[in-house]
Image (cartoon, grey):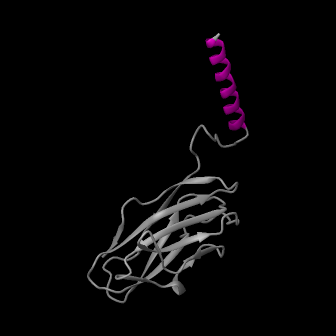
Amino acid sequence: ANAVVKLYKKAVVDKLTLILFLNNLPLTGFADTDSVNLTVTPETTGVTHGQTIFVPIYLDRTLAYKGIGTTVSYDPALLKPIREQSQTADPNITISQPLTVNGKTVVRVSSFPGREIPALDVTKPLALLAFQTLEPGQDSPLEVTEAYLYGSQLEQLTVTKPQQPLLLN
């Protein structure tokens, strides 16, 4: 009897997989197809005192989102955010004033959850953060401390973010 039940369950799963495949639907629960890589790549090395540096944040998948958020920490003794020169890929995405979260100074790039953000061009940054350097000759660490994305059905997507702080030098 157990062999018959196992065979029946396998046939149902195979049929469901085939139906999803034929209808071009994601195999939710069978494979993680909703993962996104987030990269932060400072455009400048050899930073000098008073220089403006730009830090682009990219996503590697073109999807329509209904919620985006990432938090970037920095050392306020070495860097000062310049909101007027910072940009986002969509008017529904905002860049916060500097905040203190868990003892770290951060800038948040986010959207209001549930608000539609059209598919973004992966060749352009989600956000371009601008900072002014305050102290010459020192490494200025930047770290992505949080990242989240919500898909078109408000499902939370898996986000892979940089694991090590980035150093601007």
In the drawing, does residue 42 fall left or right of residue 139? right
Residue 133's x, y, as percent? 37, 84
Q: Residue at x 49, y 63 (%)?
A: 146
Instruction: Please tell me which residue lies in front, 58 or 135.
Output: 135
Q: Which residues are magenta?
A: 2-22
Query: In the image, residue 107 lies at what x, y percent?
Result: 49, 75
Asked if residue 21 is among those painted magenta in the image, a careful observer would answer yes
Q: Report the residue at 40% width, 67% height from top.
A: 143
Q: Position of residue 135 (x, y in %)?
A: 31, 85
Q: Is residue 42 visible?
A: no
In-image side of 38 versus 47 (left or right): right
* Residue 63: x %, y % from top left: 63, 58
Q: Is residue 7 magenta?
A: yes
Task: Name the residue furthest left.
Answer: 137
Q: Quadrant of the N terminus?
A: top right
The image quarter containing residue 154 is: bottom right
Residue at the top extreme, as displayed: 1
Frontmost residue, 87 versus 112:
112
Which image quadrant for residue 116?
Answer: bottom right
The secondary structure that most of the magenta stretch takes on is helix
As drawn, the residue found furthest toward the front would be: 102
Residue 20 seen by the camera: yes
Judged left or right of residue 168, residue 28 is right
- Quadrant containing the C terminus in the rendered view: bottom left
Q: How many marks?
A: 0
Quadrant housing residue 87: bottom right
Q: Is residue 96 left or right of residue 91?
A: left
